[in-house]
Amino acid sequence: MLDWLFSVEALGAFLTCFATLMIFSFLYRDNPFYKFAEHVFVGVSTGYGIVLMWFQILRPNLLDRLVPPVDAVRQQLFRAGELAPEAYATAPISMGQRLAHGQFIYYVFLTLGVLMLFKISRKFHWLSRWPLAYVIGAFAGIQIIQAAQGALVPQLEATMKDFSGRETLATWMADSCRALPAAELPTRRAEQAGWIADWMKALGADSVQALRAGEAWQTEQEGRLNDVAGLSSLEEPGADLPAAFKRMRQEQARVVARDADFEALLCAAAGGRPLDSLRLDGDAAAWGTAPWQDALLLAATTVWLESPATRQALGQRFAPGLGLPTPIAAEALAYPEGHVSLVQLLKAEAFPQSAKLDWSLPGTRKLADSLLSDVNARPERLAEWKPAQLEDLLKRLKTAGITGSAAALDARLRVFETLPEPGRTQARGEFLAFWKEGVTRELRDLRQTWLLHTIALHTAPDPLSSFSREELKAFGQDPAAWASTHGALDTNGARPAVSVAKVRTGMAVEILSNLLVLVGVCAGIFYFFFSKKHTGALGVVSKVGIAFLMMSFGASFGYTVMGRISLAIGRFQDLLAWPWMAGTALIVLVVALAVESRRARQS
Amino acid sequence: MKALLLRALGRFLALDRRWIFLLMALCIVTPLILPIGLPFTPDPAVRNLHRAIEDLPEGSVVLVSCDYDPGSKPELQPFTEALFRHLFRRKLKVVVSCLWAGAPPLVNQAIAQALEAEDIRPLGLKDKVDYVNLGYKDGRQLVMLGMGENIHSTFPKSNDGTPVSQIPLMQRMRKLGDSQLFVNVSGGSPGTKEWVETAQGRFGLRMVAACTAVMAPDNIPYYEAGQLLGLAGGMKGSADYEQLVGLPGSATRGMAAQSFGHLLIIAFIALGNVAFFMTRGRKR
């Protein structure tokens, strides 16, 4: 404690407290201690500003470009091949060389800066208008675009309010979607945000909420695609990114931009090569050393796996990421063939019926996809599947919500078995296309189903307004039937119960708020209309306008007061960080003020 | 009785303003010394800010522009500290830039504090890989425009002098649009207004902001128009965010003092008006 009292830190703490209290002493009355602190502050700020201006602005932005530092000149010479590597560190660089490597355009800016100084000359002060004109012109150019693009258009758009209360409803819906059970969140949340956006658009509410929801969905989709390609693990320090990886990144960006399907992404990850041409041979341990190989490895998991060692390595690498429960994942890893062993496990009924896979996880969905790919790619292996196993697979797919493709699979699997070899390939291709179409259609249906569920959740059994009924009818649904669905959803605890009265109140408040904005804006504008005397109706309107203006000024002032009190709190928090020092400084200051007051009275 | 009341009110109107200062100081200091946990509810705008970060996929890049100095520290530093902790906890990549010269030391302090936290230390986050502080750059809107085109040429070096081309994290961050979310912590100009008007629309940024209470009325229209996805205004905004993140800090501790300060001001405004109107006729 005693050591600390005589340390530099303690001195700093005392000075901080004393200076703060000296500034506060102005609230008592103007005094020399306040003036001292004020002058110290102004002096230190100016000194700091000058140093900052030199080291952060003038030197790097002007001087170093006119007269580059020695190292910069050496680098330029080295790049031009005029300096040998061994002479790099020791080669003498003359001032002439430094000046010769300067950027001459900056002499123009230096001249403009010097011209500004002519402001103090009576005879040549007109010269200072040139740099001012340059600055004003450049600033105006920036401001025009900024004002139109950043303020005028979006703010005008935002003032066009609707009076239906839809935004409140949309917010409630979005909040409800976010309150889904945790297990459903990873996939359903993003999808639902998209459905809500669709729904809003279907209602003609091209609103901020819809855009926000759409953006959130888009971001999440991109994130998922990035995760798939393994891009999140690419930031190893000093990683040498080969050309193949760069190509992959570009291709991937292109694929993401056009929202292409997973297969296209994998092709992109493989450097644009078709999936069927991929082969992974050699030592599995050597794979994964370069970042781009991760993406290739992932691509390879859905196609041929030639080497057992590679398969095993892949299994160890990816099985945990498939979202399997830990014991099942461990069991899968025990199989020698890694990823393929997952298929084998299903076939061998190694998964206990009681084991529940979390189908909502993207990894598990991928497993389902790969199961189908496995079957589609090698129809000759269908013979290995027993009817009970196929049924089990179909059941799992149905649980995952892939009912359309499950049905398609069910119908086609049996056809494949009867086909001769040349026809099988063609049938396989047809089936693949059919399956993709089925998945797309089914996803669309799934969206619609969830959309209707969501609408019903918020409107039934006491429909909020007629639009919900109309909306349900537009989808060919009976509102009364959906009312019962809503009840079932709530009973299951899958969705939080929403008070219809609360939503109604929220909508009423939104409508009232928008009306107030409309009245306030119009009345405020009339107040500033001076071409006609403010009497009669115009007088009343302008009085309403001034009332709104006063209220808005009051609200702004309230924020200002809050800010000032926050600053005072901050200062007191700083003082209370060293309570003993603050107390000592306060006593010293009070005594000093008393002495100073006495002297002032005597004089 | 009425005469006594009028005399008291008259004396109240003539009250030396220094008594008001003293009372205000007491109202602020007392809750700081004797903490009183007054409840408060997070504002929807702050909830949306929090949600915008929560919605980001793991590994997303977040660009944080810290545009303030020690003058706004009480209001904004608590937000910055909670923000970094939140971003790190969500395993997001963080790139920080500053348009105010006084900001880099505050940023370094907030990052160091976040890295020392119990829930962050085990993550083993690395400078330049998981986060980077690019430091201060003068030029106001020109810097914003430059960052929109090419951050590497606008910030050739990071705050500690490392060339940006050698920073692994910056390989994913070539321009403003490469970030999945842009967070502006603003203490004045250049700040949120300039970022929204210069960069948000032009480069299609998903943007949230925290600003001082004085600036909040100017920035609320941007939030209402959807240009800002979320907004935290003043110390109250910082306290709201701290509560949502579950990291009560200095802003949360200051809320009781803030409330008592407001109550005192309201009481004086009410009493002053009553005294003014009751004694007005008497003076005439």
Image (tube, rainbow, N blue to C red):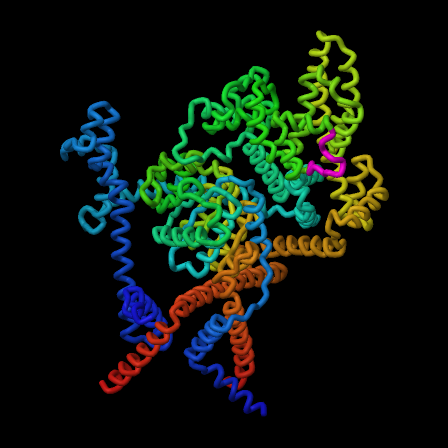
The image quadrant where one finds the N terminus of chain A is bottom left
| Residue A51 placement (x, y as % from top left) | 25, 52
Measured as percent of width and height from the top left, residue A448 is found at 74, 35
Looking at the image, residue B95 sits to the left or right of residue A501; the answer is: left
**The one of A215 and A148 positioned closer to us in this rendering:** A215
Q: Which residues are magenta?
A: A349-359
Is A174 situated left or right of A239 in this image? right
Would you place residue B2 above or below residue A276 in this image?
Answer: below
Q: Main secondary structure of the magenta part?
A: loop
Whole-percent x and y of residue A504? 74, 54
In depth, the one of B20 and A400 nearer the eye is A400
Quadrant in the rendering for residue A346: top right
Q: Is residue A495 above or below residue A547?
A: above
Q: Tell me, yes or no, whether the highlighted magenta stretch contains residue B65.
A: no
Q: Is residue A212 left or right of residue B161?
A: right
Q: Position of residue A189 (x, y in %)?
A: 65, 41
Which of the two residues, A251 or A343, is positioned nearer the viewer here?
A343
Question: Do we see residue A225 in this rendering?
Answer: yes
In magenta stretch: residue A355: yes
Vertical position of residue A584 compared to residue B227: above or below? below
Res B174 visible:
no
> Which of the pair B123/A52 is nearer the observer?
B123
